[in-house]
Image: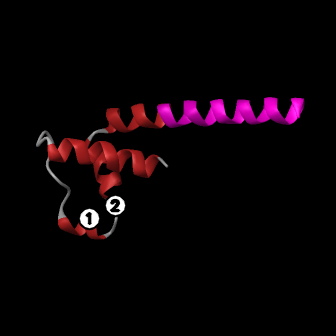
């Protein structure tokens, strides 16, 4: 899921021309998300924290459903 989120946000940056696209060899290896993570570690960590938060919310929801259900 994180991979797709990074790709989506990276696409907006490329379309708006605020960020250059990854080299072709990186794109062909399907590692453009990793290239972005290396080039912009703060942004990557921000998305990682968001995914972690969503995951914890879903786990907590599942636990409440299992206990009550």
Q: Is residue 34 left or right of residue 15?
A: right
Q: Is residue 45 above or below residue 34?
A: above
Report the residue marked by disc 2.
31
User: Which quarter of the rendered picture does the C terminus lie within?
Assistant: top right
Residue at 33% x, 32% y: name it.
Answer: 42
Report the residue marked by disc 1.
27
The spot of residue 56 in percent (x, y) is 64, 32
The spot of residue 28 in percent (x, y) is 28, 70
The label number, if any, that marks residue 1 in the structure image: none
Residue 39 part of the magenta-drawn span:
no
- When asked about the image quadrant of residue 47, the answer is top left
- Span highlighted in magenta in the image: 50-69
Q: Nearer the viewer, residue 42 or 67?
A: 67
Residue at 88% x, 31% y: name it.
Answer: 67
**Which residue reaches farthest front?**
69
Contact, CB < 8 Å: mark 1 with mark 2? yes
The spot of residue 43 in percent (x, y) is 33, 34
Colouring mode (rainbow / by chain / secondary structure / one colour): secondary structure
Q: Is residue 53 left or right of residue 16?
A: right
Q: Is residue 50 above or below residue 30?
A: above
Residue at 23% x, 43% y: name it.
Answer: 12
Element marked by disc 1? helix
């Amino acid at each position: 899921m994180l991979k797709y989120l990074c790709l989506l946000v990276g696409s907006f940056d490329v379309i708006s021309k605020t960020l250059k696209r990854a080299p072709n060899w990186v794109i062909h290896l399907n590692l453009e998300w990793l290239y972005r993570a290396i080039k912009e570690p703060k942004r990557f960590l921000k998305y990682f924290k968001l995914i972690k938060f969503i995951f914890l919310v879903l786990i907590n929801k599942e636990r409440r459903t299992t206990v009550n259900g």
